């Protein structure tokens, strides 16, 4: 015996899954006419949205060559990744900041690790903190501490100290996950859905 899928044309567009020995009770998922979240019956079920695509990281100064920049959204969790190199600014003492994230960061603070180094991660590669503050990724000078010790004042990596002698080969490689409060499911900053 198999399960049966019924598509009802009544207002609300109900889909009713009727169970066999695996599904023990009927489940009703109501799809609103205007889109949005799926309502489940009985209560307690959920359907989580999913998207993936590419985004365009933009440095605060100069330009970069983006090797790859992808993103993934599951529910309100957004994971961004990138491999950036070819920084045109090699002399500024300004902080390295990257903008262009595909969804705004919600109220929850986000921190991760960025791997910095030279092409093929030879001499000089090291981990740094990656802090998502608002819509900006800032590169810290050290790895984040999760030991419960109070963090020192923010100290960010600057262009000249990171890139200097290795301008054409310097890379930032990262994967960062943050939460968004966005409910539109429409990415921003030119990010695409694939």
Image (cartoon, rainbow, N blue to C red):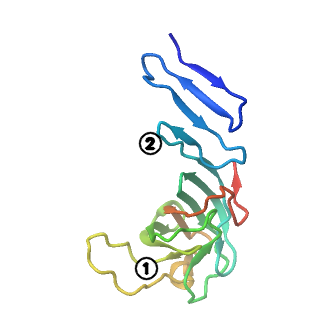
Most extreme residue toward the bottom, as rendered?
A: 93
Residue 7, image x, y percentages: 67, 26
The image shows residue 73, relative to residue 155, as above or below, that is: above
For label 2, the residue is: 44
Most extreme residue toward the front, as rendered?
A: 11
Q: Looking at the image, can residue 125 be seen?
A: no
Residue 69, image x, y percentages: 62, 58
Q: Residue at x 71, y 37 (%)?
A: 11
Closer to the camera in the image, 31 or 162: 31
- Contact, CB < 8 Å: mark 1 with mark 2? no
Camera-side mark, 1 or 2? 2
The image shows residue 145, relative to residue 35, as above or below, that is: below
Q: Residue at x 64, y 80 (%)?
A: 60
Quarter-of-image position of residue 87: bottom right
Closer to the camera in the image, 174 or 25: 25
Residue 110: mark in rendering: none
The image shows residue 75, relative to residue 112, as above or below, that is: above
Q: Earlier in the sequence, mark 1 or mark 2?
A: 2
Badge 2, how many Cα within 10 Å: few under 14, some, many 20+? few
Quarter-of-image position of residue 91: bottom right
Q: How many marks can you see?
A: 2
| Left or right position of 87 against 43 | right
Residue 191, image x, y percentages: 69, 60
Q: CA distance from mark 1 to mark 2?
A: 44 Å
Closer to the camera in the image, 114 or 77: 77
Badge 1, how many Cα within 10 Å: few under 14, some, many 20+? some
| Left or right position of 28 against 6 | left
Q: Residue at x 61, y 22 (%)?
A: 5
Q: Looking at the image, can residue 178 be seen?
A: yes
Residue 63, image x, y percentages: 69, 75
Question: Which secondary structure lies at badge 2?
Answer: loop
For label 1, the residue is: 141
């Amino acid at each position: 015996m198999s399960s049966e899928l019924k598509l009802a044309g009544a207002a609300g567009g109900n889909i009713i899954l009727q169970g066999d020995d695996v599904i023990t009770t009927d489940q009703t998922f109501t799809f609103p006419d205007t889109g949005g979240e799926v309502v489940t019956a009985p209560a307690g079920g959920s359907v989580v949205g999913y998207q993936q695509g590419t985004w365009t990281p933009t440095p605060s100064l100069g330009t970069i060559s983006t090797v790859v920049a992808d993103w993934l959204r599951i529910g309100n969790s957004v994971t961004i990744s990138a491999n950036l190199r070819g920084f045109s600014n090699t002399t500024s003492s300004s902080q390295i900041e990257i903008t262009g994230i595909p969804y705004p960061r919600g109220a929850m603070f986000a921190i991760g690790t960025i791997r910095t180094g030279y092409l093929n991660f030879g001499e000089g590669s090291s981990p740094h903190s990656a802090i998502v503050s608002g819509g900006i990724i800032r590169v810290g000078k050290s790895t984040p501490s999760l030991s419960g010790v109070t963090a020192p004042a923010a100290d960010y990596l600057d262009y000249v100290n990171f890139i200097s002698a290795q301008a054409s080969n310097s890379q930032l490689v990262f994967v960062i996950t943050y939460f968004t409060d966005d409910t539109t499911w429409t990415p921003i900053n030119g990010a695409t859905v694939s």
